[in-house]
Image (tube, rainbow, N blue to C red):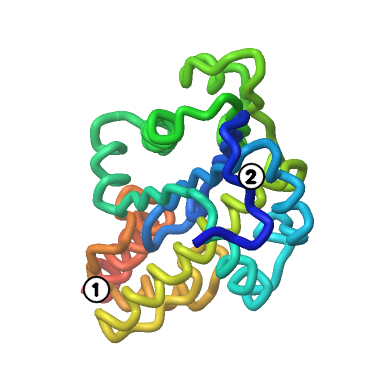
Amino acid sequence: MFYKGYSHSSKKVICGIDEAGRGPVLGPLVVVGFCVEAVNVEVIKKLGVKDSKLLSKRQREEFYKDLIEFPHKIIIISPEEIDNRFDNNKNLNSLEVDAMESIIKHFKPEKTIIDSPYKDCDKLKVELNLGENDIVEHKADENYAVVSAASIIAKVTRDNEIKKLEKEYNVSMGSGYPSDPYTIAFLKKGKEYPFIRKSWETYKNILKEKQQKKLFDF
């Protein structure tokens, strides 16, 4: 059942794409496509959506309840997939491009708007074979409601995945970001959980510190 005021016309479809969890050393990367017909963009704007980073946890969760009533696609990329990509001399961008391609193929939108993970937005546009009508920009999650909606779903989904992991493994890991002291403290405990991105420099540096301490103690 869609949000009240949603129209079911057959007019132009717009898809916003964004991610959450690109930088963390723990947990998955989540890429989301949020799709509406052009006539319904105003409905999304009236909800008051913003880039997820500009909202409190409670605000994001409230918006999420409404936004998941609209067509959307969530792709969850595990730490193992991320590490495998790095092991094969590729980077996170290639995983995001794969996810974006999957979303675009799924919805076949007449217009796609993406918050670019690339410094070179034109490069991403070429890789995705997008047209002149499509938009790839930095801070698209601040400037376009459909991308803001995607960012909110992505952030709440990732937060929920972290909660599941904490419950499953009976641990407290913080946000998963390298800047979070709780996350660093968790990593320094030394257990090799499957949700750690072992290809991340943060994790590698902590391992080096431990090895150096062992040598020193010896």
> Residue 131 vs residue 78: left or right?
right
Numbered circle sitting on residue 147: 2
Q: Residue at x 31, y 54 (%)?
A: 79
Q: Residue at coordinates 63% horizontally, 23% vertically from top-left?
A: 134
**Left/right of residue 9 with respect to residue 175 in the rendered view:** right
* Residue name at image x 70 percent, y 39 percent: 39
The quadrant holding residue 12 is top right
Q: Is residue 124 above or below residue 40?
A: above
Residue at position x 57%, y 24% in the image? 110
The CA span between labels 1 and 2 is 37 Å
Q: Secondary structure at mark 2?
A: helix
- Under mark 2, the amino acid is Val
Dot 1 or dot 2: first in sequence order is 2
- Assess whether mark 2 and mark 1 are in contact (beta carbons under 8 angstroms): no
Q: Residues within 10 Å of mark 1 (few under 14, many from 20)?
A: few
Q: Quick one: 215 or 201, which is closer to the camera?
A: 201
Amino acid type, mark 1: Lys
